[in-house]
Amino acid sequence: MTWLGGWLRELILVVLLAAFVEMLLPSKSMERYARLVLSLLVLLTLLSPIVALLKGDVTGELSLAMNQQEKKGGVFSGAGKGAGSLEKILADGRVLAAGAQEQSLKLAAEEVAGQMRNQIAGITGVQGAKVTVTLGMGKASDTTQGEAVPVIASVKVSFPPAVSASGSGSGPAAGTTTGSPSEPIVITPVEPVQVNLGSDTDEDSAAASATSSPDIPEGSSATPGKGTDQDQTESIIKLLEQNWNLSREVIQVQKSTAGEAKL
Amino acid sequence: MEIIQVVGIGLLSTVLILVLKEQKPMFAFLLTTAAGILIFLFLIGKIGTILGTLERVAESSGMEMIYIKTVFKIIGISYIAEFGAQIVRDAGQESIASKIELAGKVLIMVLAVPIISIIIETVMKLLPA
């Protein structure tokens, strides 16, 4: 019974409104047309229970159609252009957001690289290692959610040859390596350096952890320079693997002059 | 008392226009337009009051807003078209005035299209297939 009351009230209101609006109209020439639209409205209100039964939401459909009309506009209305510019603005926003993300990734990568460098210097004792971290957006391996998170795409560590890694203590040895970079990297100048490295790390290991210090004297005693480099590479990779939860493929360690160990 | 102001503006501008028309017909036309706009602006506040009352009543009684929106559009289109057509007619361009009126009529009819389509669809569903 309540819907009947509501329907009647709406009907009366629409009829009153139509009568009132007809008086408001300025000229006779428009009156016929306006009357047609108003009578259609009255008819729709009369039929509204049936229409609701057969078609569902009448007013929603009507307002949708009106909005579409408004959006289309005429020749002179800038409605279409406005929509285009809105899309353009949104696209610009996306581009700007992507740029900001890239920038933040770069910053984060620098930060991560700095931390890695400190860890490498502290734990393995390799001073002056150059760490380049590339971050990318991707799915995290441990989460199943679809959202993209920044992940470490690649880590490139290049450390100076053992000579300079040994520190500033061995001036002449470092001089010889840098003096003739390509040929005389012959292992001869490297060899005395191993000792220095060992002593250097021994000094450092007071502060650093014990993981590298046993390795290096071992390497220096057992195998010549190449082996120590391998050990260093290995220890750096292991460190990064453990501390940063990285897989082996993304870590790339190389000596800054010639030797490259890509794992 | 506002009606006296309106009539005063109208009479004054009519006398001025009649005087001016002999010397400078162009300025007479401008004066006509200005007087028309002045009276229209005078009235637009009152029209706003009426429409505001209508809207409030419709809102409080739970009438669908889309109906009242349509009605307001009709009123707006007819007022603007009428006003523009009369200004153009005063300037002696009867044909352009009738085009403006035509545009007003078409735009009012366009408002009826969604309503007509809904009614026709309902009727077609009512009929046995």
Image (cartoon, rainbow, N blue to C red):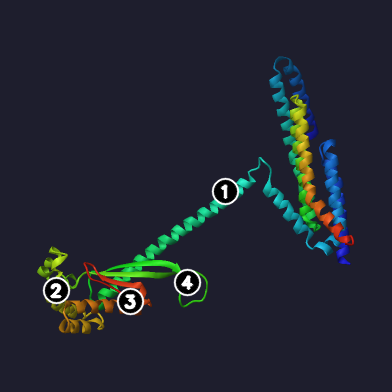
Label 3 chain ID: A
The mark that comes first in sequence, 2 or 3, is 2
Tell me, yes or no, whether the two marked residues, 4 and 1, touch with CB atoms within 8 Å.
Answer: no
Label 2 chain ID: A
Label 4, on which residue? A139
The numbered mark at residue A187 is 2
- Where is residue B120 drawn, in percent x and y? 84, 54
Q: CA distance from mark 3 to mark 4?
A: 20 Å
The mark that comes first in sequence, 3 or 1, is 1
Q: Is residue A38 left or right of residue A204?
A: right
Residue drawn 51% across the image and 57% down it: A94
Q: Is residue A129 visible?
A: no
The numbered mark at residue A85 is 1
- Give the residue type that dot 3 points to: Leu
- For label 1, the SS is helix
Select label 4 or label 2 by which is in front.
2
Label 3, on which residue? A240
Label 3 crowding class (10 Å Cα cut-off): few <14, some 14-19, many 20+?
some
- For label 2, the SS is helix
- Give the residue type that dot 2 points to: Ile
Q: Nearer the viewer, residue B36 or A31?
A: A31
The mark that comes first in sequence, 4 or 1, is 1
Residue drawn 84% across the image and 48% down it: A38
Q: CA distance from mark 4 to mark 1?
A: 33 Å
Label 4 chain ID: A
The numbered mark at residue B28 is none
- For label 4, the SS is loop
